[in-house]
Amino acid sequence: QQQVKQSPQSLIVQKGGISIINCAYENTAFDYFPWYQQFPGKGPALLIAIRPDVSEKKEGRFTISFNKSAKQFSLHIMDSQPGDSATYFCAASTTGTASKLTFGTGTRLQVTL
Amino acid sequence: KAGVTQTPRYLIKTRGQQVTLSCSPISGHRSVSWYQQTPGQGLQFLFEYFSETQRNKGNFPGRFSGRQFSNSRSEMNVSTLELGDSALYLCASTLPSQESRQYFGPGTRLTVL
């Protein structure tokens, strides 16, 4: 029950388009859902995170949508830019073990000109 | 403020050997977590240390161990290396008041021949 399933595995979006990455979880005890961005040769960096008491959170061009009943959450990148080309990971954790993140398998995003 | 630092950045070992990786957290951060990243398994939680005590543990064999020092620096050790241990090992640190916000280092790339 610790899995977090992420799709798609890879995504190609034109500059200015919307990138959408989806995740689904099984463990209903999860109560913290962050998204990380990773560039080659670098460690993951926290992009945006949400808790299940809200259905949406927006920070700049990045939005998380959260559906508690469906146990799904997604990342939307508006006005995608070539600099957004990276691998994106969704993750989840539970209160009390917040530092023990369960990660999705990652989505490699390529934004073309 | 300096970020999370990991040493060495690259390491080549042979099967059966042991290896020690080091992580220096961001100043003031007392929690250090370790993750293994591989193309096949993705990012997997190894363990977390807080105030020199292991607080959480993932599902890895006993060959993987760690420790934390009084200055919050952490080391992880892998004994009797196997080919499958080849991976990027990531360290992340957090503030006690923001346990869910993890800051990752660049990782140590371990290759086992």
Image: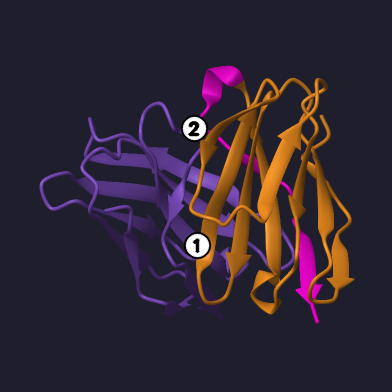
Position above or below: A65 against A9: above
> Answer yes or no: do the residues labelled 1 and 2 have beta carbons within 8 Å?
no
Question: In what element is the residue under mark 2?
Answer: loop
Amino acid beneath label 2? Ser
Position above or below: A25 against A11: above
Q: Which residue is mark 2?
A: B100
Q: Which residues are magenta?
A: B96-113
- Residue A47 percent location from the top left of the image: 52, 47
Q: Nearer the viewer, residue A17 or B80?
A: B80
What shade does chain B have?
orange
The extreme left residue here reads A69
Answer with the quarter of the image where residue B47 lies. Answer: top right
Q: How many marks?
A: 2
Q: Which mark is residue A78?
A: none
- Residue A18 percent location from the top left of the image: 37, 67
Residue at screen point 83% across, 52% down: B20
Mark 2 belongs to chain: B
What shade does chain A have?
purple
Q: Is residue B106 visible?
A: no
Q: As drawn, is B45 to the left or to the right of A105?
A: right
Q: Nearer the viewer, residue B72 or A66?
A: B72
Amino acid beneath label 1? Tyr
Q: Which mark is residue A88?
A: 1
Quadrant of the image containing the C terminus of chain B? bottom right
Answer whether residue B63 is magenta in the image.
Answer: no
- Residue B15 percent location from the top left of the image: 79, 76
- Residue A54 percent location from the top left of the image: 24, 33
Neighbourhood count class around disc 1 (C-alpha, 10 Å): few under 14, some 14–19, many 20 upward: many
Q: Is residue B45 visible?
A: yes
